Image (cartoon, rainbow, N blue to C red):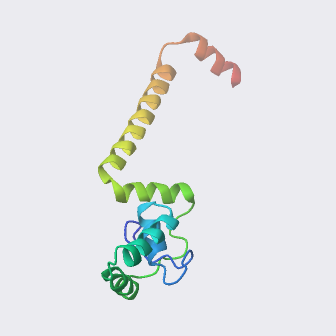
Amino acid sequence: MAARTRFYLNKQDAKWKGVCAGIADYTGVEVLWVRLGMAGLALIAQQWWVIAAYFIVAAIVDPKPIGLYQNADDQKFWQGVRSNPKRSTAEVRSKLRDIDRRLADMETHYTSRNTALADEIERLR
């Protein structure tokens, strides 16, 4: 399976080589703003190295594999992991901690000496 944290050229949303679409996919920024930024650097700020860097990246980087993400939520999650891995792990820990607490509450309720619950379970059998 392809690494979801790597930078890939995005040929599916590409206008030309897929570099700007790949940057947008990698960072989570709207592709229009990436394209305008690249054009602004190249034309207005006269940073001609941007054009050379564009061709070098297009030649070196692999295209994004088809089906890298299952859905849009999966894509947003991996973009968040790339931008701030510590925050992502903290969010996952928090969710797992909440699930663990809820399971412990259910276990405590089920194993307690609650006669009303025991009677209800017996009636269901």
Disc count in the image?
0
State left or right for residue 12 relative to residue 103.
right
Please tell me whether residue 106 is drawn above or below residue 54 in the rendered image: above
Q: Residue 54 appears at what percent x and percent y?
A: 38, 82
The answer to which quarter of the image holds residue 38 is bottom left
Q: Residue at x 34, y 73 (%)?
A: 45
Looking at this view, name the residue that lies furthest to the front.
44
Q: Residue at x 42, y 59 (%)?
A: 79
- Of the 4 image quadrants, the one containing the C terminus is top right
Q: Residue at x 50, y 60 (%)?
A: 75
Looking at this view, name the residue that lies furthest to the right.
124
Q: Residue 39 appears at what percent x and percent y?
A: 44, 75
Q: Is residue 2 visible?
A: no
Nearest to the observer: residue 114 or residue 36: 36
- Of the 4 image quadrants, the one containing the N terminus is bottom left
Q: Residue at x 56, y 58 (%)?
A: 72
Please tell me whether residue 83 is drawn above or below residue 44 in the rendered image: above
The answer to which quarter of the image holds residue 81 is bottom left
Please tell me whether residue 71 is drawn above or below residue 46 in the rendered image: above
State left or right for residue 80 relative to residue 18.
left
Nearest to the observer: residue 44 or residue 41: 44
Q: Residue 103 appears at what percent x and percent y?
A: 46, 31
Q: Is residue 65 visible?
A: yes
Nearest to the observer: residue 103 or residue 38: 38
Looking at this view, name the residue that lies furthest to the top.
115
Q: Residue 15 appears at what percent x and percent y?
A: 55, 79
